[in-house]
Amino acid sequence: MQSASFSIINYQFDKVYINLHNYKKEDDLGILFQPKGVFQKDKKIFELIFLVSLQHKNTEPFVRINCKGLFKFKDVETIEDIPDFFYINSIAILFPYVRSYISLVTTQANIPGIILPTYNLSSLEEKLRNNTTEA
């Protein structure tokens, strides 16, 4: 069996912001995804920084979760060698952790838990690619 060209080695929620003054019990929830990446050429590691914000219309976000995922490449030497499928798949791998964590922290904040639906995040592929730098 051939090994995968990349694998997730770690993830961490390094910034969590909740402001219940901006929370309403309405259904007009908006979600904003902001992915960016840093490729560490010497270690063959890609750090995906995935910021997810929840807000109601015309308000500041009431939840902001920043998740960092570390991915290790097998045969990638430069940023140009990163396979096209990595950008969308790395987000798809990390999103279930983010989704679960948002549910957990909102429930623990004693508001009705916010359970995000599953999303097709393929539109974030180009955004991540354009927001990736090399270190």
Image (cartoon, rainbow, N blue to C red):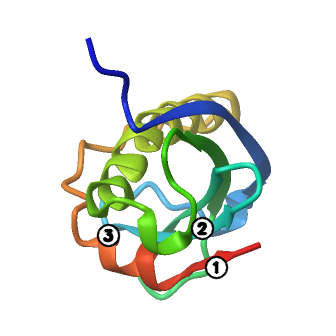
Q: Residue at x 65, y 50 (%)?
A: 44
Residue denoted by label 2: 37
Q: Residue at x 37, y 22 (%)?
A: 3
Image coordinates for residue 111, horizontal then vertical, percent: 58, 38
**Do the residues bearing badges 2 and 1 touch, measured as CB atoms within 8 Å?**
yes
For the residue pair 75 and 46, the one nearer the viewer reads as: 75
**Image quadrant where one finds the C terminus:** bottom right
**How far, Cα to Cα, is label 1 from label 3?**
15 Å
Label 1 element class: strand
**Do the residues bearing badges 2 and 3 touch, measured as CB atoms within 8 Å?**
no
Q: Earlier in the sequence, mark 2 or mark 3?
A: 2
Label 2 element class: strand
Look at label 2 and name its amino acid: Gly
Q: Residue at x 59, y 28 (%)?
A: 104
Q: Earlier in the sequence, mark 1 or mark 3?
A: 3
**Image quadrant where one finds the N terminus:** top left
Image coordinates for residue 5, horizontal then vertical, percent: 40, 38
Q: Which quarter of the picture shows residue 19?
A: bottom right
Q: Decide: few, some or many residues near mark 1? Use Cα within 10 Å; few <14, some 14-19, many ≥20.
A: some
Residue denoted by label 3: 125
For the residue pair 91 and 120, the one nearer the viewer reads as: 91
Look at label 3 and name its amino acid: Glu
**How far, Cα to Cα, is label 2 from label 3?**
11 Å
- Marking on residue 133: 1
**Do the residues bearing badges 1 and 3 touch, measured as CB atoms within 8 Å?**
no
Q: Which quarter of the picture shows residue 36?
A: bottom right
Vertical relation: 84 (above or below) 71: below
Image coordinates for residue 4, horizontal then vertical, percent: 37, 29
